[in-house]
Image (spheres, helix red, strand yellow):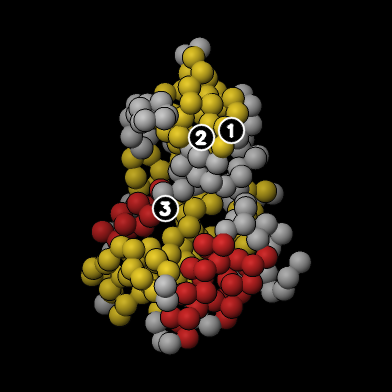
Amino acid sequence: MDVSLPFPQPLLPGRFVRRANRFAAEVLIEGQLRYVHLPNSGRMEELLVAGAPVRVFPRERSRTWGTLLLVRHRDRWVGLDSHVPNRLWETALRAGGLPPVCSVRSWEREVSVGGERIDFRVRTADGLWLVETKSCNRVEDDVALFPDAPTARGARHLRALAHAARHGQRAAVIWFVQRDDARLLQLDAHADPDLVAAAREAHRVGVRFSAYLCKVTIRRIVVREAIPVEVPSRAP
């Protein structure tokens, strides 16, 4: 199954200068300092280092000159846009889905579950699934680590999925790792113990966890093989 997403073009080459705030950065493009949108609130400290090669889509907004989409790290392009997983998953749905959610017939976006907004409700040949997608771009020693900063919203989503699973609803979390150099994805209790506790309970009651590596080029991002998801059995 070919599940891929093209990046908007042109993507202009530049160099990372500094992070201005959670959603903005300064980059140097053709000798000019540009203030650009950063579509990811994660820390990404190992990726966003001064001088790192980047690619920027030049679309002017009210406050920014363009959008920072890619960074070069360890001789590969890494995706930065945290909205990409939702778009990749919808592409996969059009092609029939990805394990564990297959034989897709229809889907809805942004559904209310236990007071939270879950990314998708998917109707398959075997019944309904609730699906939350997540982005990961942090890898250490061949291990993709999620999250790289505390996310109260992520913990709430996991608890909502766990509640649904206890009442007989099928539910899944699917991570898209926006790089291709990891052998497994591990939930990082040091970064966010509350999220990992919520994930541990969700997994215990039947929420399915899946993760997929992605090959990233300056033209597109392509979903590759699945990797295991490891949930720590106890607090650090």
Q: Is residue 129 above or below residue 58?
A: below
Q: Residues within 10 Å of mark 1 (few under 14, many from 20)?
A: some
x and y, in percent, of residue 165 in the image: 45, 82
Name the quadrant containing residue 15: top right
x and y, in percent, of residue 45 in the image: 65, 40
Residue drawn where x is 34% and y is 45% of the image: 5
Do the numbered discs 2 and 1 sit on residues whose CB atoms are within 8 Å? yes
- How many numbered marks, from 0 up? 3
Which quadrant, please, contains the N terminus? bottom left
Residue drawn where x is 39% and y is 82% of the image: 169
Mark 2 vs mark 3: give the one in front. Answer: 2
> What label sits on residue 19 in the rendered view?
1
Which residue is labeled 2 in the image? 24
Q: Is residue 89 left or right of residue 43?
A: left
x and y, in percent, of residue 126 in the image: 30, 80
Q: Is residue 175 above or below residue 138?
A: below
Q: Earlier in the sequence, mark 1 or mark 3?
A: 1
Residue drawn where x is 30% and y is 62% of the image: 109
> For the residue marked with disc 2, what is the amino acid?
Ala
Can residue 17 be seen in the rendering of this structure?
yes
Which residue is labeled 3 in the image? 85
Q: Determine the residue located farthest toward the front in the rendered image.
A: 62
Q: Nearer the viewer, residue 1 or 218?
A: 218
Residue drawn where x is 40% and y is 79% of the image: 170
> For the residue marked with disc 3, what is the amino acid?
Pro
Do the numbered discs 2 and 3 sit on residues whose CB atoms are within 8 Å? no
Q: Residues within 10 Å of mark 2 (few under 14, many from 20)?
A: many
Q: Residues within 10 Å of mark 3 (few under 14, many from 20)?
A: many
**Disc 1 from disc 3: Cα separation:** 23 Å
Q: Earlier in the sequence, mark 2 or mark 3?
A: 2
